[in-house]
């Protein structure tokens, strides 16, 4: 059997990049892996963990001779990263990414790529609240969706090669328009993060004695929010800066619903509360039935 890729360059090797490196290593999906990051500490960690054959902080050097380039940095770094590596890309190279917002990824990457380079934007819908190369693991993408958002006219063979990589990682592929992706993710992922960041932030403003009690009795619900609110600050800053419109639209609807619940609580409207909670319980059951719990 031929190896799917000769040389994969991972630009950014944190949670997502290193998890993919582990899959590529495990299944022999490339003859060699190059990992690029900014800091010496990250590159040393990659060497120590044996995640790549070569490490470098020079992005042009990283992509030279690569047939697949995976951008796995926070979204805010994309423009600078692509400008640095683009001159070293050979025609025929496939560039993909893993960013959580897709319209901005296309806007920041596509215009800088030389002719003949294929761009297949991607988003593995999988993650944890941890960061860095030591946080990755090879089963992160198993039984998860990977959404690809190629622009019309993208070479189907390039899309299929990227899809095959994610299928090897255990993911199921969905292809959709970038804007549609950003709207869906605004409700399923970005809004829950705003809510978690808000609740945990509110608690940190409470007086010290109450804070201690909150930590002590966290298991009663607060704990789940703290896990989400511990997610990477830079990555999530970039998600909100780059999916502004869709997140604000969802927040508007959310605040209207919150006001409705607030009203039901204030006026002792148990019927509304119970009806509401029955509807939301059905959503949870649907997620369990879909195997996404
Ligand atoms: P991470 O663990 O913080 O890793 C980020 C990596 O990018 C690090 O290796 C970092 O290197 C490198 N980097 C940052 N700025 C750079 C620059 N200017 N030049 C070169 N390398 C740079 O992040 P992550 O969680 O893997 O997230 C990466 C991407 O995946 C993001 O776009 C995010 O939206 C997406 N994503 C994340 C999740 C999740 O749950 N975490 C899920 C799906 C998709 P240094 O360590 O040297 O700074």
Image (tube, rainbow, N blue to C red):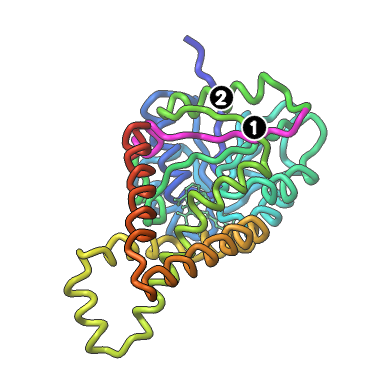
Residue 77 visible in rendering? no
Q: Residue furthest left?
A: 216
Find numbered disc 1 in the image and state the secondary structure of the residue it sits on.
Answer: loop
Q: In the displayed structure, does residue 251 sit left or right of residue 104?
A: left
- The dot on residue 6 is 2
Residues at discs 2 and 1 in contact (Cβ within 8 Å) = yes
Residue beneath the point at 82% across and 33% down: 115
**Residue 191 against residue 120 in the figure, above or below:** below
Question: With respect to residue 227, does 9 lie above or below?
Answer: above
Please provide percent x and percent y for residue 113: 77, 41
What residue span does the magenta drawing correspond to?
A: 138-152
Whether the magenta-drawn stretch holds residue 126 is answered as: no
Say above or below: 28 vs 227.
above
Query: Which residue is rendered at x = 70% and y = 54% of the image?
Result: 79
Q: Is residue 261 visible?
A: yes
Q: Which mark is residue 65?
A: 1
Q: Residue furthest top?
A: 1
Q: Is residue 149 magenta?
A: yes
SS for callout 2: strand
């Amino acid at each position: 059997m031929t190896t799917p890729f000769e040389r994969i360059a991972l630009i950014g090797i944190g949670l997502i990049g290193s998890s993919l490196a582990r899959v590529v290593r495990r299944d022999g999906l490339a003859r060699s892996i190059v990992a690029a990051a900014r800091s010496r500490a990250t590159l040393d960690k990659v060497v120590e963990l044996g995640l790549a054959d070569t490490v470098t902080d020079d992005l042009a050097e990283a992509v030279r001779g690569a047939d697949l380039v995976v951008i796995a940095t926070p979204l805010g770094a994309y423009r600078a990263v692509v400008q640095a590596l683009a001159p070293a890309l050979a025609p025929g190279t496939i560039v993909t990414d893993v960013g959580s917002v897709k319209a901005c990824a296309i806007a920041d990457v596509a215009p800088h790529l030389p002719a003949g380079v294929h761009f297949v934007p991607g988003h593995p819908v999988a993650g944890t609240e941890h960061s860095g190369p030591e946080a990755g693991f090879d089963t992160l993408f198993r039984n998860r969706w990977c959404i690809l958002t190629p622009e019309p006219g993208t070479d189907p063979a390039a899309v299929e090669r990227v899809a095959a990589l994610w299928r090897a990682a255990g993911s199921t592929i969905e292809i959709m328009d970038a804007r549609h992706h950003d709207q869906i993710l605004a409700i399923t992922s970005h809004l829950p993060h705003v809510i978690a960041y808000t609740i945990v932030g509110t608690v940190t403003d409470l007086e010290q004695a109450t804070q201690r009690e909150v930590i002590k009795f966290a298991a009663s619900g607060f704990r789940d929010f703290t896990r989400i609110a511990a997610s990477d600050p830079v990555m999530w800053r970039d998600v909100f800066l780059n999916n502004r419109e869709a997140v604000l639209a969802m927040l508007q609807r959310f605040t209207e619903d919150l006001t409705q619940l607030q009203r039901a609580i204030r006026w002792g409207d148990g019927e509304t509360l119970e009806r509401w909670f029955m509807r939301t319980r059905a959503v949870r059951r649907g997620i369990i039935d879909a195997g996404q719990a």
